[in-house]
Image (tube, grey):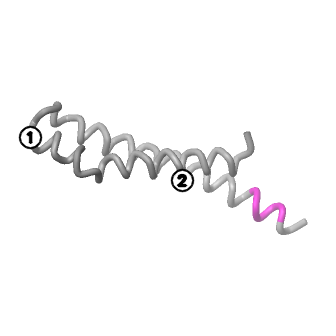
Amino acid sequence: METTEILNQFNSCYLKIQAIAQDENWLLLIANKKIDPEAATHLGDVLHYLDQAMGCVEEIVEVKFNQESEV
């Protein structure tokens, strides 16, 4: 898998998880205490760590892009 493909996959996962975190049903589950309130914290943690991972991969993609531009 190419580096840009990895970044695209991370981005896709991030967007899907972010959609869940903002979904009305998800928010109602938390508000009505039908699921462990920690679930919201865990989902936020997942988004944070995915964002951090994407940042690391973005740096590699940037370096690779700059190297290819110089050639």
Query: Which stretch appears magenta?
Result: 64-68
Residue at image location 52% in from the left, 45% down from the top: 53
| Foreground: disc 2 or disc 1 | 1
Q: Position of residue 71 (x, y in %)?
A: 90, 65
Q: Nearer the viewer, residue 62 or 34?
A: 34
Please name the residue that numbered disc 2 is placed on: 55
Circle 2 Cα neighbour tier, 10 Å, few/some/many (<14 / 14–19 / ≥20):
few
* Residue 1 percent coordinates (x, y): 73, 39
67 in magenta = yes
Under mark 1, the amino acid is Asn
Q: Amino acid at mark 2?
A: Gly
Query: Measuring 23% from the left and 51% from the top, which residue is drawn there?
Result: 24
28 inside magenta stretch? no
Image vertical order of residue 49 relative to residue 71, above or below: above
Question: What SS does tag 1 mark?
Answer: loop
Label 2 element class: helix
In the foreground, 28 or 17? 28
Answer with mark 2 or mark 1, whichever residue precedes in sequence: 1
Q: Residue furthest bottom?
A: 70
